[in-house]
Image: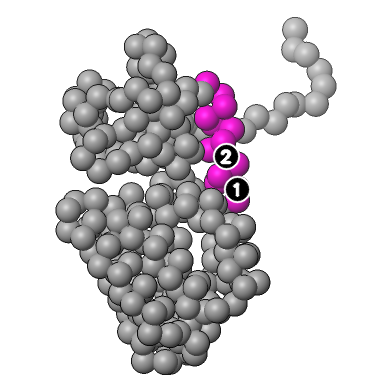
Amino acid sequence: MKTQGKAMSLGKVARPRLYEQLMEQILGYVEAEQLGAGDRLPAERDLAEQLGVSRATLAQALVALEVLGVIDVQHGTGAVLVYRPSMATLLRKLREHQNRLPDIVEARSTLEVKLAALAAERRTAEDLAAIDAALEEMAAEVEAGDRGVHGDELFHQAITAAAHSAVLAQMMSFISEMILETRIESLGQPGRPEVSLAAHRRIAEAIRAGEPQSAAEAMGRHISVVSEVPLLQ
C-alpha cells in the first residue's frame, strides 16, 4: 500500500572532490601512525605512491591542508604536521574558507590597488630598495623551485609601507592572515609563482616611474589573476 502525502524532494548528493578524498586518506594515515604536532609526513613522492595518485594531484590536497593550517610545508624539508584534526572539523574549516574567499578578494582589490597608486606618489629611495629586495627574494625562491611565498609577502608589505598611509596599513595588517591563506593557495598552482613574480616586476616598474594610474592598474590585474584559484572554490 502506497503512503499518501506530499512527496519528498531529494537533491543530488555532492560527490567529494578528489583532493577532499586524499585529505581524508592523509588524515587516516596520520591517525594510523599516531603522528602528532611536529612529526613529518612521508616525502611527497612516497606519499603519492602509497595513495596511488600523481604528485600533481597529491600537491592539491597538501596545499588545501596547508591553507587550513593542518600542515606546514617548507621547501626541501617536506610537510610537517601542525595539529591532527577530525575530518568533520577539516571539512567545516574548508567550507568556511570557501565562503570567505570572495570577501578576501574584494578587500584586497580595494586596499592594494589604492596602496599601489599611493606608493607611486609617495615612495622614497628606501621604499624602492625594500621593493627591489623583495623581488630578489622571491626570484631566488622561485629559481630554487620554491613557491616564493615569503618573497611574495615581503613584496606586498613593501608596497604597503611605500604608500605611507597608517590607516590603510592597519587595515592590511587586520586581514594579513586571511591573505596568507589565498597566497599559499594561489602560489601552489602550477606556473603561478613565475606569473606572480612577473606581475610584481610590472607593479614595481610603475611605482619606480611615479605613475599612480599604471601602478593601480598593474596591481588590479595581479589581484585578479591570483584570485583565480579553482582548488578550494
Tell me which amino acid carries mark 2: Arg
Numbered badge on residue 99: 1
Question: Residue, x 62% and y 73% (percent of image)?
Answer: 166
Secondary structure category for the residue under label 2: helix
Q: Position of residue 215 (x, y in %)?
A: 43, 84
Q: Is any atom of residue 28 visible in this view?
A: no
First to last magenta residue range: 86-100
Residue 190 % position (x, y)? 26, 53
Does residue 19 show up magenta in the picture? no
Q: How is the image coloured?
A: one colour
Label 1–label 2 contact, CB within 8 A: yes
Majority SS type along the magenta span = helix
Q: Which mark is residue 95?
A: 2
Residue 71 is drawn in which quadrant? top left
Relative to 211, residue 105 above or below: above
Residue appearing at x 34%, y 11% in the figure: 33
Q: Is residue 144 above or below residue 118?
A: above
Q: Within 10 angstroms of label 1, few (less than 14), some, or many (20 or more) residues?
A: few
Rendered position, 51 above or below 101: above
Closer to the camera, 38 or 67? 38
* Label 2 Cα neighbours within 10 Å, binned few <14 / some 14-19 / many ≥20: few
Residue for point 34% across, 30% down:
80
**Towards the viewer: 62 or 120:** 120
Hey, which residue is sitting farthest bottom in the picture? 210
Residue 163: percent from left, percent from top: 52, 79
Identify the residue shown where x is 78% and y is 13%. 3
Amino acid identity at mark 1:
Asn
Residue lying farthest top? 1
- Labelled disc at residue 90: none
